[in-house]
Amino acid sequence: MRTAEGLTSARAAQLLEQAGPNQLPTEKPVPQWRKLWAEMTHFFALMLWCAAGLAFIADMPQLAVAIVVVVIVNGVFAHIQQERAQHAAAKLRALLPADVMVRRDGKVQTVHASALVVGDVVLLAAGDRLPADMALMLASACAVDESMLTGESESVSKAAGDRVWGGTFMVNGYGEATVTATGANTRLAGIADLTSKAVSPPTPLSLELRRIVRVTAAMALGIAAVFFMASLLVGFQWRDSFLFAIGVAVALVPEGLLPTVTLSLAMGAQRMAARNGLVRNLEAVETLGSTTFICTDKTGTLTQNRMNAVEVFTADGSVHVTGDGYGPDADVQGHGMDKAAAAALAARAASQGRAELHGGQWRAQGDPMEAALDVLARRLTGTGPGAAPARRLPFDPVRRRESALVGADLFCKGAPETVLPVCGSVPPHVKEHVEVMASRGLRVIAVARRRLGGVPATWQTGTPADLETGLEFLGLIGLQDPPRPDVGDVIGTARRAGLKIAMITGDHPGTAAAIARQIGLTGSPECVLEGSDLPADDQVLGALLDRDGVVVSRVSPEQKLRVARALQARGHVVAMTGDGVNDGPALREADIGVAMGLSGTDVAREASDLVLLDDHFGTIVAAIEQGRATYANIHRFLTYHLTDNVAELTPFVIWALSGGQFPLALGVLQILALDIGTDLLPALALGAEAPGKRVLSRPPERRHLMDRRLIIRVFCILGPVEATTEMAVFAAVLAAGGWTRGQPPAPGLLAAASGAAFMAVVLGQLANAFACRSATVPPWKLGWGTNRLLVWAVLAELAILAACLYVPYLAAVLGQAPPTPMGMALALLAAPAVLAADWIHKTVRNRLRPAQGSAVA
């Protein structure tokens, strides 16, 4: 039975058997083989598997093996990358302590946290992680850090009768509490459930790739069907026509697209890591480039995450701390220094946080605000902490003040509106100065004292109402968490990039609004909301939040989730920052979850897509810049790939239109060699192109990868020029060799002509690689050597070309031979022809649209 000394061991065992262990519920893990299988069987991979099977049926085993290798390598690589993510629910279990002190059988015992049951009496001390949801029975100067659950940056004082939550921890004081909920019934378990149920939406890149693959697959099958009918009409046997159509379909599948995209994203991730942004999900690299709305926390991201006492106002004047209050160069100026020092000492006496000196710089230990008061007292008086208080009257939300009994004096600090009324007399201008300090964005606390003149025993047990009366007003202290020095400039850069920014924080609305004004975040008109005031209708909520510079304070985990969903419903790609357990669900729900690497919890980091290694808002913008560059690079090598496809398809079109009278310039294996052999390295090098100068001077990309501009450039400019050169070279070599229409060319002549056409396509793609570096600037203005990877890739492309033409076995497999001198001379014209067409197109386009620039330049 439960007694005043807690439960009996027998009763605890009975309750444990009924309710189960005090552990968060776990989900059955997905087997590794199933995860790997999913990477091998998505739509694009299935299409490639089908292509490999068809190639095998068509008696082209080399092609089949090459495609299978591409699928397997990409599947394994993607699996390894994704295994580093999405373990938030598992990390939550580590937040519960292993052993706790309880009262059972009338004595103190140590039990494992999993053995706790409802009704257990738990002993708590400073530094303890709370093992379950509990109600305090005894509390002495208790302060609990609930930031992981509430987002509130300051510790919360607790009194007897207050509730405390599992997963939080005691920062001050000691107490005893009765367990009210364990395991799956705790508030922490509720957040774990929200985190596990939140599903990350598909990324813009994945949606675009699905669209491109579906379009490409439909085109390949449609064109293959056309050529199947055409080959039947020109007299091919049914089986030969079918195999020919299979070869055409396989040739049109972009085998190199998937590895090119994957490796381009990996390059983007490496560059982000060099700028303090750790990417945990490769597709997040591109999604960052599509971001339209940033929901950022305040503390640590926009500010320096340390409170700083900057002003002391007394009846004799004001004392100001200029410079960094924690640094050696801070200066103290003003009038009434003695009274200011007395106020600072009183504030420190009523505090428990302290600061330590390291290399001339003060560092906070414990509560940031109380550490700032300690630094202020040391700076004004040069003395360290005095005697420990004989008794503390902890802060509570009703009184909104706290006191400490030191010797014969009672020192009190708290909100001015609660401290000033209990003072005997207050100068008339004090209340006005409170408003002045608050309007400057300072957090204002009032400090007072009572000289007791001895410490009767009743004062040791007296209530706050008995002791906190007739106080002597000492002063007002203004504190601020300084904004990061460059955050205002970064916000300006983000806005020029077309991004909307909102502050979503658990802090007080006044504090949040003041910081937002200081850094230039608030919009016009100013919009400051509290979580409790958010409208219940999600559509109304979305309309209310869909503006730049909105500030939302005092948000709960559920409200943060609603914010992300409401903005996504209005078409935004949302980046959401967070650092605590409470942020896990919102981080997973947002398009981009951004966690703090320095101050964030494991749960937040594991639920995120991007981890800021320096907790700096500027790193988010830098990551967005790299994300946009990666998007542009994908656009570049997609243009490069599709231009090659036009040149690859053209010989089949001409063959079909001629009724088989004009020979095929390229065969299926030659096309495979172009796709995987010569094109892959330049495409990868385009994926390493550095961000353009104007990448953050325009709105986010909100268009398809395969858009009208790309289609015009590929199918009306670059592709036709390359294909025309290819077919002209092929026809010229055939004609010079004596071929006449309607007659089959000699095998040697056909092989040499095909080799010349192959060479023309490769050289045209060589020039195309440089042309695709920008949609507005010709390559000679960018500098031929500014992308060194591309230079090496082009040299490798030339080496592969030479091997394909002059290594006898390889040339025989591909069905070609070295071109004749005339064929080689004509093929060399492909590169200047592509560059000339590209320059004319860019010149005309820039003159017609001079002000809009390029989305991919």
Image (cartoon, grey):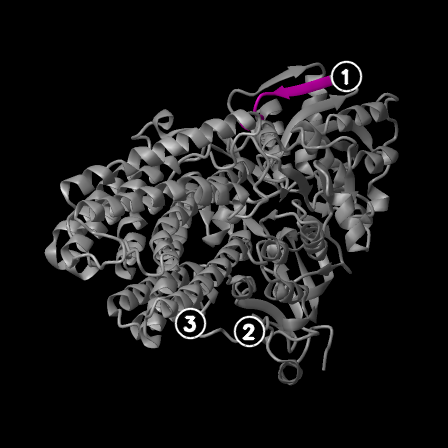
Residue type for callout 2: Glu
Taking depth in this image into account, of 136 and 97 the one nearest to the observer is: 97
Residue 857 visible from this viewpoint: yes
Circle nearer the viewer, 3 or 1: 3
**Are the two marked residues, 2 and 3, in contact with CB atoms closer than 8 angstroms?**
no
Precedes in sequence: disc 2 or disc 1: 2
Circle nearer the viewer, 2 or 1: 2
Residue occupying the point 69% across, 19% down: 319
**Mark number for residue 27?**
2
Residue type for callout 1: Asp
The image shows a total of numbered marks equal to 3
In space, the residues marked 2 and 3 are separated at their CA atoms by 20 Å
Q: Which residue is mark 3?
A: 37
In space, the residues marked 3 and 1 are separated at their CA atoms by 76 Å
Magenta span: 318-326
Above or below, comparing residue 41 to residue 452 in the picture: below
Q: Which residue is mark 1?
A: 316
